[in-house]
């Protein structure tokens, strides 16, 4: 009885292998258009996914660009010179720099006014404002 079951199992196994080989041969003999159609569908799906990912990337880049532009504008507003400084003409700015430089070298306001041939009151004002800015800057560093 057992021998009969083993023989039937072997026959069934051989038939199964034969069936698999037949199916495989039929697939190979089929028209290759099915393979081409499958490949075309696969490529179309990949292109669609690629386009979706590309659109997401573009949206992310634009969003990042907008965020960075806002950040740059914010930083420019915080660190831009005040409107008073922007209104100073170039000549006055050069003269102011010379006054500050001479003041740092130890010249008195009268000496600076005489050397630069400018009003003594203007020299005093520039020196006092510069000294006040330096004091404020040092206080900010301590904080």
Image (cartoon, rainbow, N blue to C red):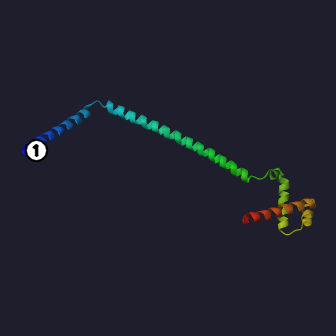
Q: Quadrant of residue 60?
A: top right
What is the quadrant of the N terminus in the image?
Answer: top left
Q: Residue 35 location in percent, x, y?
A: 33, 33
How many numbered marks are there?
Answer: 1
| Viewer-proximal residue among 127 and 143 | 143
Looking at the image, residue 36 lies above or below residue 64: above
Q: Residue 138: horizontal and vertical position, in percent?
A: 76, 65
68 sits left or right of 87 in the view: left
Residue 111 to residue 69: above or below: below
User: Where is residue 142 drawn, in percent x and y?
Assistant: 73, 66
Q: Which residue is mark 1?
A: 6
**View extreme (bottom): residue:** 106
**Residue 90 higher or lower than 111, as above or below:** above
Q: Give residue 27's quadrant in the image.
A: top left
Question: Residue at horizontal 78%, vertical 63%?
Answer: 136
Residue at 85%, 54% (x, y): give it: 91
* Residue located at (23% from left, 32% from top): 26
Q: Secondary structure at mark 1?
A: helix
Residue 18 rendering spot, x and y as whole percentages: 17, 37
Residue depicted at 39% across the width and 33% down the height:
41
Res 135 quadrant in image? bottom right
The quarter of the picture where the C terminus appears is bottom right
In this view, the residue farthest toward the front is 1
**Left or right: 39, with 29 as reference point:** right
Judging depth in this view, the residue of 52 and 47 nearest the camera is 52
**Badge 1 density bin: few <14, some 14–19, many ≥20, Cα 10 Å:** few
């Amino acid at each position: 009885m057992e021998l009969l079951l083993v023989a039937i199992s072997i026959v069934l196994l051989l038939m199964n292998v034969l069936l698999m080989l037949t199916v495989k041969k039929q697939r190979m003999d089929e028209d290759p258009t099915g393979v081409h159609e499958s490949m075309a569908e696969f490529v179309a799906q990949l292109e669609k996914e690629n386009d979706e990912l590309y659109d997401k990337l573009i949206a992310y880049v634009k969003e990042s660009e907008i965020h960075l532009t806002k950040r740059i504008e914010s930083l420019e507003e915080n660190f831009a010179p005040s409107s008073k400084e922007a209104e100073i003409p170039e000549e006055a700015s050069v003269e102011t720099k010379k006054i500050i430089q001479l003041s740092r070298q130890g010249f008195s306001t009268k000496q600076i006014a005489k050397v630069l041939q400018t009003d003594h009151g203007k020299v005093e004002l520039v020196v006092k404002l510069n000294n006040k800015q330096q004091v404020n800057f040092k206080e900010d560093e301590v904080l």
